[in-house]
């Protein structure tokens, strides 16, 4: 049994990132390891996951970078996040801990020199053993030992059925049929969203919740707002909806796993790349999803067996 720290951008109340942390926790625990999530967000402990919010007294054998847009420039990233990555780099070096990335993404970079100094401290470290990336183009970043697998959150519905802590909480038959998830910079698409949702029960949906939430998502008095820090409640709304119009990646992908239609608008580059490479077979064929999950397991076991 290995003690494993799952590290990611889990202080921001981001549904997609936090869901990845929970999924990797479940998988690691299922195969006999002792996972620990690095986050100050209390929702992990409320769900029954072990979590820590500082490196003091943390004793682990390995670290997984658990998803998120890790390959990113400094000028497009929150300075607090860059500081947190620097602290991780020093912790890895001090403890000489092997580190491996799972379902990592990129945002606005095409080659390693564009990635922030703090992030390169991790990637170029002797302790970095590689990563599974969710965009095929990231295989060309120039980072050693990269492998491609579809985004882990495409398996959300299967994971919700398999792991009780991730069971969606059904909002009932009166839940919204059409969800609008727009950032402030994409507010010009609101008239389009209202037109498309005409005749349907509609609500704004926030995928960034809690005290330290980021994301700049809009909500106006003209419609109800779904803004709940409980992951399972939010999953319930995504699973019940018929459509979600979103300017963000993960609310749409999570919804797709439940069979909900994803309408991307004002799409950032990473969203466009996902749509370009997406193959619907993963949603239509459970055997394909099992294959993807088994491949994640193979990488996880190979990494942990090597230390």
Image: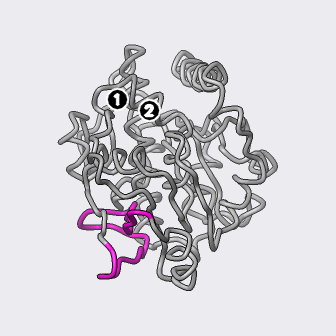
- The residue labelled by disc 1 is 35
Q: Quadrant of the N terminus?
A: top left
Tell me the quarter of the picture where residue 118 sits: bottom right
- Considering the numbered disc 2 on the image, is that residue within a helix, a strand or a loop? helix
Tell me the quarter of the picture where residue 216 sits: bottom left
- Judge whether residue 170 is colored magenta: no
Distance between mark 1 and mark 2 Cα atoms: 9 Å
- Residue 157 percent coordinates (x, y): 46, 34
Q: Residue at x 30, y 69 (%)?
A: 225
- Residue 212 percent coordinates (x, y): 29, 67
- The residue labelled by disc 2 is 24
- Considering the numbered disc 1 on the image, is that residue within a helix, a strand or a loop? strand
**Magenta region, mostly helix, strand or loop?**
loop
Which residues are drawn in magenta? Answer: 200-223
Task: Give the camera-side residue of 108 and 190.
Answer: 190
Residues under numbered marks 1 and 2 in contact, where contact means CB atoms less than 8 Å apart = yes
Tell me the quarter of the picture where residue 120 sits: bottom right
- Residue 101 percent coordinates (x, y): 57, 40
Task: State left or right for residue 12 relative to residue 49.
Answer: right
- Judge whether residue 218 is colored magenta: yes
Upstream in sequence: badge 1 or badge 2: 2
Q: Residue furthest bottom?
A: 188
């Amino acid at each position: 049994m290995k003690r494993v720290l799952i590290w990611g951008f889990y202080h921001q109340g981001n549904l997609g990132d936090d869901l990845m942390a929970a999924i990797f926790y479940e998988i690691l625990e299922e195969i006999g390891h002792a996972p620990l999530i690095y986050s100050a967000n209390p929702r992990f402990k409320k769900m029954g996951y072990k979590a820590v919010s500082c490196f003091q007294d943390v004793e682990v054998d390995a670290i997984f970078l658990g998803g998120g847009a890790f390959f990113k420039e400094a000028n497009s990233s929150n300075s607090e996040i860059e500081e947190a990555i620097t602290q991780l780099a020093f912790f890895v070096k001090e403890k000489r801990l092997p580190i491996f990335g799972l379902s990592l993404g990129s945002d606005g970079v095409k080659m390693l020199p564009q990635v922030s100094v703090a992030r390169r401290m991790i990637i170029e470290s002797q302790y970095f053993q590689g990563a599974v990336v969710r965009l095929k183009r990231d295989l060309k970043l120039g980072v050693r030992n990269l492998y491609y697998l579809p985004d882990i959150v495409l398996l959300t519905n299967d994971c919700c059925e398999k792991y009780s802590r991730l069971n969606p909480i059904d909002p009932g038959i009166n839940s919204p049929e059409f969800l609008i998830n727009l950032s402030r910079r994409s507010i010009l698409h609101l008239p389009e969203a209202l037109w498309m949702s005409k005749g349907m029960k509609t609500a704004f949906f926030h995928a960034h919740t809690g005290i330290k939430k980021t994301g700049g998502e809009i909500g106006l008095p003209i419609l109800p707002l779904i803004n709940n820090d409980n992951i399972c409640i939010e999953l319930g709304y995504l699973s019940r909806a018929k459509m979600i119009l979103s300017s963000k990646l993960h609310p749409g992908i999570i919804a797709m796993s439940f069979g909900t239609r994803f309408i991307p608008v004002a799409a950032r580059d990473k969203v466009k790349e996902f749509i370009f490479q997406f193959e619907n077979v993963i949603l239509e064929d459970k055997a394909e999803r099992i294959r993807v999950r088994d491949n994640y397991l193979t990488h996880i076991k190979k990494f942990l067996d090597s230390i």
